[in-house]
Amino acid sequence: MMFLPADSLIGHKVTCVAEVIDGDGDVVGLQLNLVGGGSYMLTDWTDWSLRVERRSDQKLPDYFWPPGDHSLRVLEEDSQGVEIASVESKRDEVGETVGVVIGMTTFGDYAASAHADGFTLEKVG
């Protein structure tokens, strides 16, 4: 598994923005499906940092455990793809990424963050 800097998202075209939901209905991740296949997964990690993972598929990763207790809830879709125009990262005192605001041309802006209480996601623009 390779984690990437959040700004590696810029320029990619997204066909689907989806929340990862656990069995309690809590949002635990954000999946961005890409034109041509593949995806980016954003979630909180064990050190409360925000992790960005590039995936070759659009399936839920097996680290969302147990698999049967996690699902995707689609927030935005566009079969042609919407460009990620901007990414603003927020870092903690040791330089770890703990939040991002992702700006997409027609889907708007989404803020994702990791903290001691888990993962949060909100539409901010």
Image: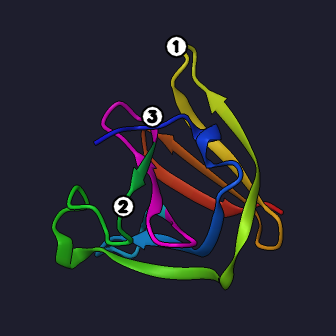
Q: Position of residue 96 (x, y in %)?
A: 51, 24
Q: Residues within 10 Å of mark 3 (few under 14, many from 20)?
A: many
Name the image quarter holding the N terminus. Answer: top left
Q: Position of residue 98 (x, y in %)?
A: 55, 35
Identify the mark nearer the N-term, 3 or 1. Answer: 3
Q: Position of residue 47 (x, y in %)?
A: 35, 30
Instruction: Let me know if residue 29 appears in the view.
Output: no
Say which mark, if any, is on residue 56: 2
| Secondary element at tag 2 | loop
Depth check, front residue: 108 or 14: 14
Depth check, front residue: 44 or 37: 37
Q: Are marks 1 and 2 in contact (CB under 8 Å)?
A: no
Q: Which residue of the protein is positioned furthest toward the top in this rendering? A: 94
Give the residues in magenta. 31-51
Estimate the spatial distance between the alpha carbons at disc 1 and disc 2, rounded to whole Å. 30 Å
For the point 74% across and 63% down, the residue is: 83
Compared to residue 20, the image places residue 9 above or below, namely: above
Corner quadrant of residue 78: bottom right
User: What residue would you read off at disc 1?
Assistant: 94
**Amino acid identity at mark 1:** Val
